[in-house]
Amino acid sequence: MEKKIVIHHENGLHARPAGVFVKKAMGYQSKVEVKAKGKVVNGKSLMALLSLGLDRYDEIELCVEGDDQEKAFSELEALLIQTTSQTVSATNA
């Protein structure tokens, strides 16, 4: 599954939301990749995600492939379109 998504986090995909994304991605067997700025990185690697330097309103392509891809894609997409405050609140619940 692949889809273009716009980053809506107030400060882009910085360490905290990227960490939440990676933690969620690691819970799935599916391969998770993020394509942006001419690069393709492992969505289960915090350092790889941070290396993209994604800012608010940057467009990425989320690619998820594997047995649990539908659930993984749905949850990861939701994380990417939330605002930073919503993501932080969800991790503290």
Image: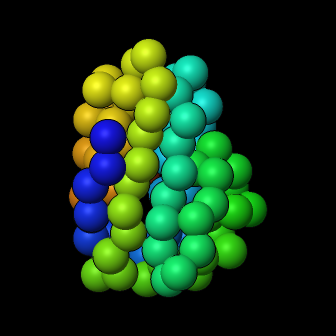
Q: Who's the residue at 37% across and 42% down the image? A: 76
Q: Is residue 51 above or below residue 4?
A: below
Q: Who's the residue at 31% across and 24% down the image? A: 71
Residue 46 position, x and y percent, is 68, 55
Indicate the quadrant containing the N terminus: top left, top right, bottom left or bottom right: top left
Indicate the quadrant containing the C terminus: top left, top right, bottom left or bottom right: top left
Residue 84 in view (yes/no) = no
Q: Who's the residue at 26% across and 55% down the image? A: 3
Judged left or right of residue 46, residue 93 is left
Residue 57 position, x and y percent, is 29, 81
Between 91 and 55, the one nearer to me in the picture: 55
Residue 65 position, x and y percent, is 45, 34
Residue 84 position, x and y percent, is 36, 63
Q: Who's the residue at 64% across and 52% down the image? A: 42
Residue 44 in view (yes/no) = yes
Between 32 and 51, the one nearer to me in the picture: 32
